[in-house]
Image (cartoon, helix red, strand yellow):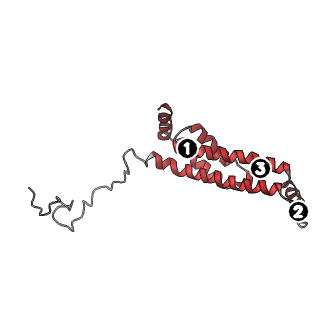
Amino acid sequence: MSNNPSPFGDQNPYGQNPYGAPNPYSSPNFAGPPGGGQPLGAKLMAPAIGLLITGVLGLILTIVSIVMALGPPPPIDPNAPPFLQEFQKGANGPQAAVIQCLFLLVNFFIIFGAVQMMRQKMRGVGIAASVVAMVNVGNCCCLIGIPIGIWSVVILMQEDVKAAFNANANS
């Protein structure tokens, strides 16, 4: 039996003096969780959610562009430079709607890759979706897709992530 009157054991890890400090000459422990890094699920989840947001945002913008392409043509700004006037003319009509439908498929693929990344399945699809998000020029979605895609590819290329995907593929 200890000399501590508390029934819960020694509440002070530094001995009897409640104002005592730990050894000032010891090194701090910044090791983090066992295994040397953050848990694999947390490591994959953040870039996968970013990729998912990129795909959903691109999907919404593409649907709006399809609706606008099939609607009445907007007035052309006569003060705009000639190349911009041609761009405004080309943004409307069936040809523009078909091109936007292709970007609709691209955004569905990005969403599919993000979901597979969250499930830790089909690593190759996750890598491909990350690269496609970087080059998705429809509605300027590459502006958000470039940093998210690079982040996703970097995470997917790490050895512990590869091992987890391989373990899930074998089970």
Does residue 103 lie above or below 23 as drawn?
A: above
Question: In the rendered image, which quarter is residue 153 located in?
Answer: top right
Confirm or deny contact between disc 2 and disc 3 (CB under 8 A): no
SS at badge 2: loop
Disc ID at residue 81: 2
Q: Name the secondary structure under disc 3.
A: helix
Kindly indicate whether the residue at mark 1 contacts the one at mark 2 (C-beta within 8 angstroms): no
Q: Quadrant of the N terminus?
A: bottom left
Number of the front mark, 2 or 3? 3
In the displayed structure, does residue 159 sit left or right of residue 105? Answer: left
Instruction: From the top left corner, tell me how far across and down residue 66 is, in percent.
Output: 78, 53
Classify 80 as above or below 134: below
Question: Which kind of residue does numbered mark 3 sit on?
Answer: Gln
The spot of residue 104 in percent (x, y) is 72, 48
On residue 100, the disc is 3
Q: CA distance from mark 1 to mark 3?
A: 26 Å
Of callouts 2 and 1, the N-terminal one: 2
How far is disc 2 from disc 3 in space, using C-alphas?
Answer: 24 Å
* Residue drawn at point x = 47 percent, y = 34 percent: 167
Determine crowd level at label 3: few under 14, some 14-19, many 20+ residues with C-alpha closer than 10 A: many
Residue underneath mark 1: 117
Marks 2 and 1, how far apart at CA:
44 Å
Residue at the far top: name it.
Answer: 170
Q: Residue at x 86, y 59 (%)?
A: 72
- Of 29 and 139, the residue lying toward us: 139
**Residue 87 falls left or right of residue 139:** right
Residues under numbered marks 1 and 3 in contact, where contact means CB atoms less than 8 Å apart: no
Bin the neighbour count of mark 2 within 10 Å (Cα to Cα): few under 14, some 14-19, many 20 and up.
few
Q: Amino acid at mark 2?
A: Pro
Q: Earlier in the sequence, mark 1 or mark 3?
A: 3
Amino acid carrying label 1: it is Met
